[in-house]
Image (cartoon, helix red, strand yellow):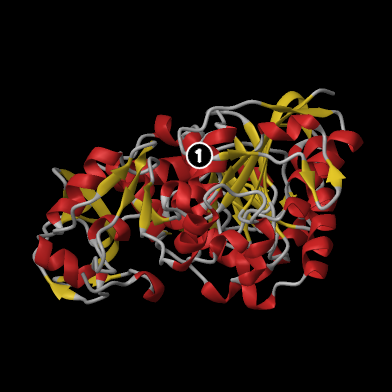
Amino acid sequence: MNNSEHDGQTFVRLPTDPNDRVHEDQPTRDELLDWWRDRFGISREFLAEFSFWEKGRGKVWAFHADTESPVRVEGLGMSVLRTRGDHWKPTTNAVQRFGHRATENVIELTRERAEAFVAGEDQEISWDGDWGYLIAAHELAGDREPLGVGLYLHGELRSQIPKGRRRDL
Amino acid sequence: MEVLDRYEPLIEDFEAFRDACERPLPSVVRVNTIKTDPDRAREALAEAGIEVDPCEWHPGLFRLPENQPGANWPYYHGWLHGQEEVSAVPATVLDPAPGDRVWDACAAPGSKTTQLSALMDDRGLLVATDNNLGRISALRSNAERLGVTNVAVTREDARNHSLKPWESKDYDAALVDAPCSCEGTVRKNPDTLDEWTIEHVEGIAGTQKGILRRAVQATREGGHVVYSTCTFAPEENEAVLDHVLDAEPCHLVEYDLPLDHATGVTEWDGERFDESVRRAKRIYPHHNDTGGFFCAKLEVTG
């Protein structure tokens, strides 16, 4: 199974036992659930319904079903997180799917700032919470709706919307 | 358009049919209930100055006004998916339940796959198969934009679909929205008929038979298989059903469809088909001002 990390099409379930990691920086399922709770306040109970998988190194997928590991297919659920490097980074799609449940590190933008954000622009904005990856959100049809991921550093919110998803709205 | 003349004996009010085929198609979007509901989507569209009419038979389908702006907030958030009105029929006919195991045999680019997932409340196993990597990439990006997390995508020839990655357990239901000669999409792509040949129709019918047989084999006793195409050719529709009824343990079942339609035909070009193919439904463009469609529901008898 150690070779699987070099196979771009094989999904391997995140281990429950830290001793079963296939590479040293592979997260365990518990570490992953803790991270969503600690960073964004998204409960372990909500995410417990999903199985979590890694394809390649550090790219984590959430699957709202289960099967035997490993599995060699083109896609398994949704890519939700990159765990390579010091700071784990959620995907735009994960934030749009799970972000309603976030209670921490959510930055609410005005309509004008939301437009700039989805156009991919970086903007000066004050924020007295943590630095790092935040969930950017705005209000739509009477409720808070997550837009995507922003990187907050030195008074600036850097839009992390992938090029193909940017829009002029 | 003269290709369609061969269907004159099948179609009531053939003039109205031909006129409808020459008109452009209304723009329709489906509300993605994984992320929102029809009321909230409608409210968000209204905030953007876009007033929509729901399609009478399906509360989650909206007809858009002409000249609507291409980019809007509800679309950005994955609340909406552009999908032709009749293309929403087969998933509603299959009507999978949350937690089911479902196979979408010809899945890309994913309009019906994402609709199946929404009907399943994004829970249970949905295996989506296609044999073309480029189309699979479109399927994956549509699924992720709409927030689908219960879909597993495989690249295979559906005729040889393997259950091995899925604990070798049969499906509760399968959708075969088969590759076809696409005659019914002529309102969207007027060039569709330029390359029409009877050889292509007969060739693709062989593929359709193979995929539908595999779908019946992979579905448990008592489970359902929906077979659909966007074409009128009986060679690709009733003749395919007739073949599979003989070859595999299954029968056709009645189902309700609150759209105007005609029944399946039992005779074509000197051939007679099993009487039960009448239970299939033919939707012509002049019936509901949509594209053309064919849809049948089978039950696996084991």
Seen in the picture, residue A5 relative to B195 is either above or below; the reply is above
Seen in the picture, residue B294 relative to B124 is either above or below; the reply is below
Chain letter of disc 1? A
- Residue at 62%, 62% in the rendered image: B183
Instruction: Return the x and y of residue B272 as percentages of the image width and height.
Output: 84, 41
Asked whether residue B194 is in view, the answer is: yes
Determine which quarter of the picture holds residue A123: bottom left
Seen in the picture, residue B159 relative to B298 is either above or below; the reply is below
Depth check, front residue: B196 or A102: B196
Give the SS element for disc 1. helix
Report crowding for label 1: few under 14, some 14 to 19, many 20 or more residues within 10 A (C-alpha).
Answer: some
Depth check, front residue: B110 or B27: B27
Describe residue A93's horizontal placement relative to residue B151 as left or right.
left
- Residue at 74%, 35% in the rendered image: B277
Instruction: Return the x and y of residue B139 as percentages of the image width and height.
Output: 56, 60
Depth check, front residue: B289 or B267: B267
Determine which quarter of the picture holds residue A2: bottom right
Describe residue B83's horizontal placement relative to residue B230 as left or right.
left
- Please identify the quadrant where the C terminus of chain A is shown: bottom left
Task: Name the residue carrying label 1.
Answer: A30
Asked whether residue A14 is in view, the answer is: no
Describe residue B44's horizontal placement relative to residue B5 as left or right.
left
Name the kind of residue labelled 1 in the image. Answer: Asp
Instruction: Return the x and y of residue B125 as percentages of the image width and height.
Output: 62, 37
